[in-house]
Image (tube, grey):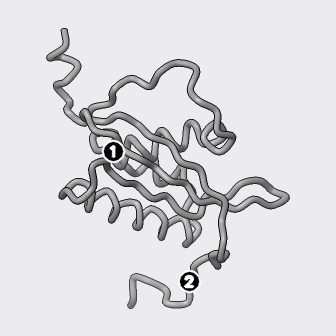
Amino acid sequence: MTLQDDKIMRIEIPNRMMSATFTLPIDGRKVVGILDYTANDTGLTPMGFWVKLKPTDSYLDRELRASGKLISRCLQHGESLKDLVDTLSQDNVIGQMANYLHKNMEDIIMGKRPEKRQRELSTDPYASQLKE
């Protein structure tokens, strides 16, 4: 018995895709998200989600890049962004980025700036207690 059906195919990726970029301040760092998507008669389909950390070349940056590749792979195999967000924890950077993308995807794609400045996000569960 195999756990994976080898006949499951990834969605064909077009040579060129539309993309949108957004940044979030998380744990005092500038985290950049890039959404690749396609558009058709039924709407927009997210195809890839790439995450980088500024400055690059750190352990966390490599982990975020790897997590973005994994999310992209899941999207290309037919997983919905909502299911992925529901699976990911808000206690980590990739979970916060994916959740923000899911909640604000239309505004991100339209290039709308948030009406109010995005508050600093934190993966530290005790950060809110320290500020009080």
Mark carried by residue 89: 1
- Disc 2 residue crowd, few under 14, some 14–19, many 20+, Cα 10 Å: few
Side of 38 where 27 appears, left or right: left
Give the spatial CA distance, label 2 vs label 1: 27 Å
Q: Position of residue 44 (x, y in %)?
A: 71, 54
Q: Amino acid at mark 2?
A: Ile
Residue 105 falls in image quadrant: top right
Answer above or below: position of 72 versus 84. Answer: below
Q: Position of residue 131 (x, y in %)?
A: 19, 13
- The quadrant of the rendering that contains the N terminus is bottom left
Which residue is painted at 31% across and 36% down in the image?
A: 26
Which residue is painted at 34% across and 61% down in the image?
A: 65
Mark carried by residue 125: none
Pick the front one: 59 or 47: 59
Residue pointed to by mark 2? 8
Q: Amino acid at mark 1?
A: Ser
